[in-house]
Image (tube, grey):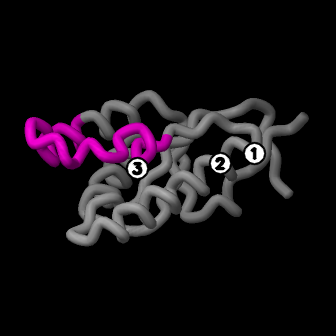
Amino acid sequence: MRTVEQAKYIYISGPYSSDRPEEVFLNVRRAEEAAKAVLLKGHVPFCPHTMTCGWETDHRLRYEDFLRMDLAWIARCDWFLYLRPSPGADQELAKARARGMAVFDSVDEVPEVAV
């Protein structure tokens, strides 16, 4: 088991949008479970899926608004957890890599905080 000395702010990235409401629900649940696992490892997750769940029905908000907000949050986080590809998650991943952030492809890769 790998450990780090202090907690990191970890951005949770993965698919959200879908034409099927049940798929949106599953995408949010997957991200939420990943965020809980990150928290249990001692870190501070940021999960835009849970923060904005349901906002897609507000017709004043555009896809670009969500992406702009997400990219701003990535700039505030230390590490990046990439759950699965999607057009938005892939743009977020590119931003994380451009910032030189540590990128993890699964919760299992995220080291625990030393106690």
Closer to the N terminus: mark 3 or mark 1? 1
Whether the magenta-drawn stretch holds residue 65 is answered as yes
Give the secondary structure at mark 3.
helix
* Crowd around label 2: few <14 · some 14–19 · many ≥20 (10 Å): some
Relative vertical location of residue 50 with respect to residue 73 in this rendering, above or below: below
Q: Is residue 38 left or right of residue 89?
A: right
Quarter that holds the N terminus: bottom right
Q: Which residue is mark 3?
A: 97
Q: Which residue is mark 1?
A: 40
**Which x, y percent locates residue 87?**
25, 63
Q: Is residue 40 left or right of residue 96?
A: right
**Between 10 and 25, the one nearer to me in the picture:** 25
Q: Amino acid at mark 2?
A: Lys
* Crowd around label 3: few <14 · some 14–19 · many ≥20 (10 Å): few
What residue lies at 54% left-to-right and 35% top-to-bottom?
Answer: 78
Give the secondary structure at mark 1.
helix
Relative vertical location of residue 45 with respect to residue 19 in this rendering, above or below: above
Q: Amino acid at mark 1?
A: Leu
Q: Is residue 85 left or right of residue 12?
A: left
Q: Nearer the viewer, mark 3 or mark 2?
A: 2
Question: Where are the magenta residues, as a range?
Answer: 47-68
How far separated are the C-alphas under marks 3 and 2? 24 Å
**Between 75 and 85, the one nearer to me in the picture:** 85
What residue lies at 10% left-to-right and 42% top-to-bottom?
Answer: 59
How far separated are the C-alphas under marks 3 and 1? 25 Å
Give the secondary structure at mark 2.
helix
Q: Which residue is mark 2?
A: 36
